[in-house]
């Protein structure tokens, strides 16, 4: 069996074995199974093949040309080349046998799969000299093998569809998640369909909640209509039985109401499947196919399996949405329905509930009107993430509002709130930050109970995190008989903003909470000045934390700015005593402001005086200072600079010696300022001065 031409002297002879008379011989038994044998003498270049072998090749024994290449020449070129290469490789190697399949052309134009199996005989040197083997018609087994492979391929595809659908549905939490998984990128490919429509049963109506791909426009007719068996989806839901239709004619014949829409249908076959979970009908799923013309048993079972997976996911999602609606409704009912407007400032609040089912927490905010035109602000968090935490939060919020409304100082309010929570005997604790704000003077009295302190955004955009004293969480402090909540006083100058928040805004599982606080401070610094706009900015930029599985409460309070007039601009800045960069920042702010106001010639003197007055406050008092810089609207414009603190001790004029390191502040002020003085301001005092082009200095006598 090769295409090598024989020598003229070695013309091969063809011997055909005939079956024996009488009992069936081996050759005859092989022939009855379309199997023949051959013997190929490589040295003599002769080929002996029986009649059965020739019939396998479709050759007439009487007209067979007896040379080895005759059989291979009968094959088509691609098969001939493949067979030659395989046989030559077997002979050249050191193997003792070979086996291969190839195609033989038939007279009717079809092809027959043929199998050759042979053993190679070699001499003592390993050279091949004889091949003995059999050839047989292998069409039946190859065809069966192709069928099996195709069947296995279909089953693998069906298994893949089920696995991908199960995986996608297992991640779907809400009804929106289910529809997104079915209609999103790869959704139809996941189901092996060209279009789908999904509907939910709502009392006596059928609501189509999503449709994609080749979903027919006729589906829109039953979007929110009464259940009508004239339409396939409604009929499937009512009967609880699937419908498999393999042609548009069959669809219209079964549902004549769809005949007006027949020309619009882009599909050929459709599977209408009821969605049933725990014996309760939920809705229906329709799958549409462009090319399909049949649904065999496996394909029907696949569709029913997909419907079962979707039904279970949909039932779980509907339950989740109902639970979440209940939980968030309860949480919303516990929070203030509206926030009143305040005089001298603006307030914005935001609340985002936890994302999973009843996993709402006890976060809250509140704004409380207080006597003497003050306002109380609070954010807090009750331990736990369930409806019990939300219920406790509602009781605690009302109690704290009542104590604050009575006019008690912040420390007393938190002490009483802690006692109230402990008396509820719930084994829950709560954290909170509470502040009383006087927007007229800018005074803020704040304390905290195991909670984050507030952030302050200054006029220049810097954000500080002042150290706020406080005590243990509410409830725990009473259990440990430690209801002392120390207060901290802050000064909120016009235009500055106070930000209170709960841990859900800065805490992400597995991440450093300090990094979350720094991220919040950055966004507060770069956000807009308006309270509402800043709250929206934080919601947008930190939205990944809104859905981190914890509640978030946010309160933004801004004191109204005091810009002055174009003829008399004004700025305010609070310098914290514990802020090491506050002094240099204040000096820079003064210089920049005077440059912006076209008064740069006064910047050196004003910066020098600013430093002297602030150093005196930071060294000799126990608090911070409020710096005010303004331009007096006079014919000759002068700068008025004021530094206010909470100390009642007035500075004294001294006469320092040559080696003294202090005591020259008032002398320097008297030398630089046009006018200066000291005024009482409520709980403290203010040292002020005016700097201008006048040459005469009028000093206010020190006390």
Image: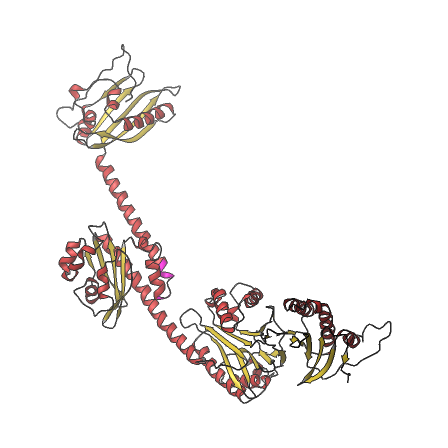
- In this picture the colour scheme is secondary structure
Q: Quadrant of the N terminus?
A: top left
The picture quadrant where one finds residue 526 is: bottom right
Q: Quadrant of the C terminus?
A: bottom right
User: Does residue 324 sit above or below 51 in this rendering?
Assistant: below
The residue lying toward the viewer, choosing from 520 and 81, is 520
The residue lying toward the viewer, choosing from 43 and 292, is 292
The residue lying toward the viewer, choosing from 121 and 321, is 321
User: Does residue 244 sit above or below 484 in this rendering?
Assistant: above
The picture quadrant where one finds residue 638 is: bottom right
Q: Is residue 383 visible?
A: no
> Residue 132 at x, y = what percent?
28, 24
Q: Report the label total.
A: 0
Q: Is residue 597 left or right of residue 657?
A: left
Q: Residue furthest front?
A: 635
Q: Residue furthest right?
A: 658
Magenta stretch encompasses residue 448: no
Magenta stretch encompasses residue 172: yes
Q: Which residues are magenta?
A: 168-174
Q: Is residue 665 left or right of residue 405?
A: right
Q: Is residue 674 visible?
A: yes
């Amino acid at each position: 069996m090769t295409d090598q031409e024989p020598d003229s002297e070695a013309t091969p002879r063809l011997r055909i074995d005939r079956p024996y008379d009488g009992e069936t011989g081996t050759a005859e038994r092989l022939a009855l199974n379309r199997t023949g044998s051959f013997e190929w003498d490589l040295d003599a270049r002769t080929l002996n093949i029986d009649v059965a072998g020739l019939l396998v090749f479709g050759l007439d024994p009487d007209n067979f040309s007896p040379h080895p290449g005759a059989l291979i020449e009968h094959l088509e070129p691609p098969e001939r080349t493949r067979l030659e290469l395989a046989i030559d490789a077997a002979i050249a190697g050191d193997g003792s046998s070979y086996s291969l399949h190839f195609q033989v052309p038939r007279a009717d134009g079809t092809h027959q799969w043929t199998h050759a199996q042979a053993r190679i005989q070699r001499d003592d040197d390993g050279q091949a000299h004889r091949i003995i083997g059999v050839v047989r018609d292998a069409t039946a087994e190859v065809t069966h093998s192709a069928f099996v492979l195709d069947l296995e391929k279909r089953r693998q595809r069906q298994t893949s569809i089920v696995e991908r659908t199960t995986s996608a549905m297992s991640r779907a939490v809400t009804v929106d998640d289910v529809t997104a998984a079915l209609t999103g990128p790869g959704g139809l490919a996941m189901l092996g369909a060209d279009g789908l429509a999904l509907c939910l049963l709502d009392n006596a109506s059928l609501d189509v909640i999503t449709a994609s791909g080749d979903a027919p426009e006729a589906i829109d007719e039953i979007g929110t209509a009464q259940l009508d068996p004239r339409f396939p989806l409604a009929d499937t839901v009512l009967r609880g039985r699937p419908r498999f239709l393999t042609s548009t004619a069959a669809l219209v014949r079964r549902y004549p109401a769809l005949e007006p829409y027949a020309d619009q249908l882009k599909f050929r076959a459709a599977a209408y499947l009821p969605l049933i979970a725990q014996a309760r009908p939920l809705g229906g799923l329709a799958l549409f196919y462009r090319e399909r013309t049949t649904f065999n048993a496996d394909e029907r079972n696949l569709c029913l399996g997909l419907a079962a997976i979707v039904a279970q996911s949909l039932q779980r999602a509907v339950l989740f949405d109902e639970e979440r609606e209940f939980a968030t409704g309860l949480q919303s009912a516990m929070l203030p329905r509206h926030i009143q407007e305040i005089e001298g400032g603006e307030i914005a609040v935001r609340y985002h509930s936890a994302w999973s089912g009843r996993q709402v927490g006890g976060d809250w905010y509140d704004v409380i009107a207080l006597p003497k035109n003050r306002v109380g602000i609070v954010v807090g968090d009750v331990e736990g993430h369930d409806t019990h935490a939300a219920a406790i939060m509602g009781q605690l919020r009302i109690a704290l509002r009542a104590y604050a409304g009575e006019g008690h100082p912040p420390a007393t309010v938190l002490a009483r709130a802690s006692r109230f929570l402990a008396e509820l005997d719930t084994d829950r604790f709560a954290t909170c930050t509470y502040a009383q704000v006087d927007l007229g003077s800018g005074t803020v009295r704040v304390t905290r109970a195991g909670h984050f302190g507030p952030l302050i955004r200054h006029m220049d955009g810097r954000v500080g995190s002042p150290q706020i004293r406080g005590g243990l969480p509410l409830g725990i402090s009473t259990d440990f008989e430690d209801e002392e909540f120390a207060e901290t006083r802050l000064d909120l100058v016009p235009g500055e903003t106070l930000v209170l928040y709960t841990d859900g805004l800065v805490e992400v599982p597995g991440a450093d909470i300090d990094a979350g606080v720094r991220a919040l401070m950055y966004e507060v610094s770069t956000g807009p000045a308006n309270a509402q706009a800043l709250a929206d900015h934080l919601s947008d930029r930190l939205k990944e934390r809104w859905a981190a599985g914890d509640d978030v409460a946010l309160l933004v309070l801004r004191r109204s700015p005091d810009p002055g007039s174009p003829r008399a601009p004004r700025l305010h800045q609070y310098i914290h005593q514990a802020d090491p960069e506050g002094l240099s920042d204040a000096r820079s702010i003064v210089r920049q402001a005077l440059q912006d106001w076209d008064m740069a010639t006064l910047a050196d003197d004003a910066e020098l005086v600013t430093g002297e007055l602030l150093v005196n406050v930071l060294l000799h008092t126990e608090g911070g200072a409020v710096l005010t810089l303004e331009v007096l609207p006079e014919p000759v414009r002068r700068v008025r600079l004021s530094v206010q603190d909470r100390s009642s001790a007035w500075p004294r004029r001294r006469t320092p010696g040559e080696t003294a390191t202090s005591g020259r502040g008032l002398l320097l002020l008297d030398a630089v300022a046009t006018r200066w003085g000291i005024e009482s301001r409520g709980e403290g005092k203010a040292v002020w001065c005016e700097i201008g082009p006048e040459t005469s200095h009028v000093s206010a006598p020190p006390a």
